[in-house]
Amino acid sequence: MDTQVLIIGAGPTGLTLALDLSRRGVPFRIVDAAPAPFAGSRGKGLQPRSMEVFHDLGVIEPVLASGRFDITMRAYQGREVLREWDVHEGRHPTAERPYARTMLIPQFRVEQVLRDALPQPVEYGMPLTSFTQDDSGVTAVIGSETVRAKYLVGCDGGKSFVRKELGLSFVGETHEDLRMLIGDVRISGLDREHWHSWGSRADQWLALCPLPGTDLFQFQATGDSEPSLALYQQIVRERTGLDDVILHDATWMSLYRTNIRMVDRFRVGRVFLAGDAAHVHSPAGAQGMNTGIQDAYNLGWKLAMETLLDTYEAERKPVAEWLLGMTTAIMMSGNPFERRGDETLQLSLSYRTEDGPGLLAGDRMPDGITDQGRVFDLLAGPDFVTLDFPDGPVLVRPDGYVAAIGRSAIDAYFSANPVTQLHHRRVAARTAA
Ligand SMILES: Cc1cc2nc3c(=O)[nH]c(=O)nc-3n(C[C@H](O)[C@H](O)[C@H](O)COP(=O)(O)OP(=O)(O)OC[C@H]3O[C@@H](n4cnc5c(N)ncnc54)[C@H](O)[C@@H]3O)c2cc1C
């Protein structure tokens, strides 16, 4: 075997998986067809649950240093401010939820932080062009090399080669009518404290959002023509009526078409799909990058321990189904920038199999203060952790979800999945009053 896990694609999904595997000491390779990292921003909303993942992966500090929580929305008619509002008004960090609001940060910066934390480089200019699998592994051609790996994970985006080679259908719809011009542009004549928007009618919509940590704005506008700086400037002039908002240059421009699709299988033998390769949807609600990060975080420990691998699809497919419906509803609501519901923060997602009151197996383990320190700090690292509270133990999975509550349920979990006990530690803690 040349490597344990071959990761195809170095977007946020593949990079999160690579970082998780690296801290577990699992041999992996991460390859990307592109010659260099993608330069465009694309996603710019990082959800609190992703920040919790980054806390565990040890990369939260550079992420926090690059992003902003305090940019408010502004709707204009020309120069007149019609309304100013905070999409996350009233959400403040608590002991249980240390990250309470969506952070604005360009996706390329998130990817850079993840790449910088990897112990080995991403192999660019290495497209996957074919693969076959048998009982013991996968044989893949990447660039001019043939590689043998125990597992292959397709994190290769919406046009996924892996998905197509597996012959999986990508069921859903393409909204030809919902097209958006996007890009990263340098602009003078606008402040960087607000996400500026114009246009009461959908076909007149224009949004210009400062990208924290850069001197760029993300340009978004309804439209279906060939992108160019001249066109973007014309749209700004026509939709704002202002001639002192000047676009100087663009580092990325694209015409975006909304696809709402997902696979019905996330695993075929030794090959897995994660991120956009498995599900695509409207960018409204800022979920795609975040969901890919969560897919990777769910899969990483299972690949490392080679256990519970079937639960990856069982747990992540319902999330993808819910996600497609939720983001479509936000898109169709007519105002994707209204105050957001709790569900977009991805904190209330659960892998529960039974319903009931209070904390149950499958729920996200909340943060909290104990006499031993913060719960998230006690959980940080690649292991299962039993938190031995005075009123009973809670077994938490490496991805921060509750595996079992109470001694007998924990014993039953370990005897059903013995390998998990090999990656387990206990912490006696008392919750601070
Ligand atoms: C305008 C816009 C706004 C968005 N806003 C948000 C937001 O605010 N929040 C959010 O969470 N998401 C947002 N998204 C979605 C987000 O950008 C995607 O969901 C995210 O990029 C998916 O990550 P990924 O790693 O799964 O795939 P990708 O980022 O697409 O990465 C796939 C990688 O695979 C590589 N690849 C492809 N084929 C091969 C091959 N054969 N061999 C090797 N490598 C290959 C590609 O080069 C690429 O680098 C937005 C998207 C758009 C377009």
Image: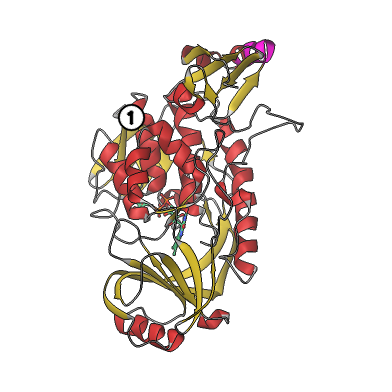
Question: Percent x, y for residue 149?
Answer: 35, 32
Question: Percent x, y for residue 168?
Answer: 54, 50
Q: Is residue 8 left or right of residue 390?
A: left
Which three-letter amino acid code belongs to the residue tagged 1? Ser
Question: Percent x, y for residue 160?
Answer: 43, 53
Quarter of the C terminus within the rendering = top right
Is residue 422 found inside the magenta-colored segment of the image?
no
Residue at (56%, 17%) from the top-left corner?
387
Residue at (49%, 51%) from the top-left corner?
102
Q: Quadrant of ligand 1?
A: bottom left
Above or below 359: residue 214: below
In this view, the residue in front, 273 or 103, is: 103
Question: Percent x, y for residue 394?
Answer: 61, 19
Q: Is residue 31 visible?
A: no
Residue at (40%, 53%) from the top-left corner?
68
Quarter of the N terminus within the rendering = top left
Is residue 409 found inside the magenta-colored segment of the image?
yes
SS class, disc 1 = helix
Q: Which quarter of the picture shows residue 240? A: bottom left
Instruction: Report how many numbered discs are placed on residues in the image.
Output: 1
Residue picked out by circle 1: 22
- The magenta span reads 406-413
In this view, the residue in front, 170 or 409, is: 409
Q: Which quarter of the picture shows residue 293? A: top left
